[in-house]
């Protein structure tokens, strides 16, 4: 019995060793298979999602090989007008042409001295070719270049021209988008430059003596004190902290507010607004009322709200931009809290960010990612790819968006947005006059939107306007926003 028992034990140990060995091999096989699946998944992701950004990167030396085989494609407006194209001379020399010069300079950008604007964002597409395969093969055999694909933008020539002319000789920016889709309708920054002569003008434009900042896209990269447009954020936080009694707010304005420390804050033009509730104080852009609110609100909660509204955060914007900054602590002085509440203090914002918030208010709190590219076209005139609107996410509740809409509508009917008062549509507006240079000068702001369900409004549009040293937002910036909105509706009706 003992001999058989030892044989059985040896057999069992042998089977156990084989089983453990098999399990180890199986685990290794699973691990190798998992790694292979992950590599395949990454490869597919790179091919379909990531390759364009890598290949299209202006620092990628392989782009030179693309440009040796393909003539750079055209950039077109939403109406099909050519904004940029490549001219080929008799010797085969190529030069990039911009028929509208400065009008689209920050939108199209340039393709020498590096690449900016859509010349950079659309680099991959412009250096790809979807012409007939037989023609491509023929060109390869003969050593000839194939024509690149064309980019159709969401930006309208008509609205771009209207915004450009309305801004005039003043420095500033105008940007508009459709809140429901994120389609950017126009983007103007002044002063600009002529991309046709960027090589010849480069030294002058970039010289230390030049303080005009023509290369700066003020719409996305500008950084300004917000002034009274920041009252949108202050009033929203106040309503969050007073959900049941914010309508009981009351403040008597005599034109000048003085706090307990002897600091004084004046309303624009020292205007005395008299007794006001919260809606009236917002419509009149009363600095005294919002100084009181600014000193009262919870600093920590205000920081949380403003972070949700994309302050100190990345923006869903493909173009280079400057982050808006908001900073305040409980240890700061009451005066700084008061100034911050009314839109001064240390807060800085970009027009693009303010436009996104405005668009979200118009879209029931949902922010759509701003989009610049509408579709792609082969050199043969065939459209082969369309870009769909992309939702960034909800940045405020529908209830908050509706309350802010009501308040911004009151700005038009009773307050500082009188430039829209006789419009054939219902606009919602917030104006702002932001002091800088130690209070000696003032930037002019206007944020506006119109929803298609409003009276006589054929489309949705949100507009942000900043006019440097423009003094009054209501008198200077609001008429520009009105002209852009009017032009859109005129175009759609015709």
Image: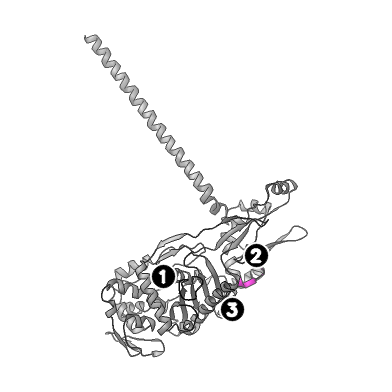
Where is residue 421 drawn, in percent x and y? 46, 83
Q: Which residue is mark 2?
A: 84
Q: Residue under circle 3?
A: 165
Disc 2 from disc 3: Cα separation? 21 Å
Distance in Å between CA atoms under marks 1 and 2:
34 Å
Whole-percent x, y for residue 373 in the image: 56, 61
Return the disc, 1 or 3, that comes first in the chain's sequence.
3
Of tags 1 and 3, which is closer to the observer? 1
The CA distance from mark 1 to mark 3 is 28 Å
**Is disc 1 in contact with disc 3, using a CB cutoff of under 8 Å?**
no
Q: Residue at x 33, y 84 (%)?
A: 288
Please tell me the numbered disc located at residue 361.
Answer: 1
Residue range (magenta)? 98-103
Quarter of the image holding residue 211? bottom right
- Within 10 Å of disc 2 (Cα), the crowding (few <14, some 14-19, many 20+) is many
User: Residue 263: x, y in percent?
Assistant: 32, 85
Instruction: From the top left corner, tell me how far across and down residue 8 is, in percent.
Output: 27, 14
Q: Quadrant of the C terminus?
A: bottom right
Q: Looking at the image, can residue 343 be seen?
A: no
- Residue at horizontal 27 percent and vertical 72 percent from the top: 243
Label 3 element class: helix
Asked whether 123 or 214 is in front, the reply is 123
């Amino acid at each position: 019995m003992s001999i058989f028992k030892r044989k059985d034990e040896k057999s069992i140990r042998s089977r156990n060793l084989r089983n453990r060995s098999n399990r180890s091999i199986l685990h290794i096989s699973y691990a190798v298979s998992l790694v292979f699946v992950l590599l395949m998944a990454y490869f597919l992701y790179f091919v379909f999602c990531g390759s364009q950004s890598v290949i299209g990167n202006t620092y990628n030396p392989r782009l030179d090989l693309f440009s040796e085989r393909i003539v750079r494609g055209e950039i077109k407006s939403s109406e099909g007008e050519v904004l940029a194209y490549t001219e080929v001379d008799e010797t085969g020399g190529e030069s990039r042409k911009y028929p509208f010069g400065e009008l689209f300079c920050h939108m199209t950008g340039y393709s020498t001295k590096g690449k900016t604007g859509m010349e950079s964002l659309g680099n991959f597409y412009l250096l790809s070719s979807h012409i007939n395969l037989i023609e491509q093969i023929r060109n390869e055999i003969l050593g000839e270049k194939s024509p690149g694909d064309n980019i159709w933008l969401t930006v309208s020539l008509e609205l771009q021209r209207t915004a450009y002319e309305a801004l005039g000789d003043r420095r500033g920016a105008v940007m508009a988008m459709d809140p429901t889709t994120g389609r950017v309708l126009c983007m103007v920054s002044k002063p600009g430059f002529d991309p046709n002569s960027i090589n010849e003008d480069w030294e002058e434009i970039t010289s230390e003596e030049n303080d005009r900042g023509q290369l700066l896209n003020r719409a996305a990269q500008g950084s300004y004190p917000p002034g009274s447009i920041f009252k949108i954020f202050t009033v929203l936080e106040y309503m969050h902290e007073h959900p049941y009694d914010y309508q009981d707010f009351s403040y008597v304005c005599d034109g000048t507010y003085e706090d307990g420390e002897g600091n004084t804050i004046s309303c624009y033009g020292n205007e005395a607004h008299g007794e006001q509730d919260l809606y009236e104080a917002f419509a009149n852009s009363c600095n005294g009322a919002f100084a009181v609110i600014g000193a009262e609100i919870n600093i920590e909660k205000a920081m949380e709200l403003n972070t949700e509204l994309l302050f100190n955060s990345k923006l869903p914007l493909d173009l280079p931009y400057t982050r808006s900054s908001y900073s305040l602590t409980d240890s700061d002085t009451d005066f700084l809290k008061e100034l911050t509440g009314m839109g001064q203090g240390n807060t800085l914002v970009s027009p693009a960010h303010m436009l996104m918030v405005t668009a979200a208010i118009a879209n029931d709190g949902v922010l759509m990612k701003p989009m610049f590219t509408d579709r792609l076209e082969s050199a043969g005139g065939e459209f082969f790819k369309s870009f769909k609107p992309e939702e960034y996410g909800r940045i405020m509740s529908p209830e908050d968006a509706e309350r802010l809409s009501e308040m911004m509508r009151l700005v038009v009917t009773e307050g500082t947005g009188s430039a829209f008062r006789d419009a054939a549509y219902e606009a919602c507006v917030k104006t702002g006059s932001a002091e800088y240079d130690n209070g000696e000068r003032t930037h002019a702001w206007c944020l506006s939107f119109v929803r298609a369900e409003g009276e006589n409004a054929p489309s949705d549009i949100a507009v942000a306007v900043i006019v440097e040293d423009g003094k009054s937002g209501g008198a200077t910036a609001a008429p520009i926003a009105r002209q852009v909105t009017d032009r859109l509706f005129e175009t759609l009706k015709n």
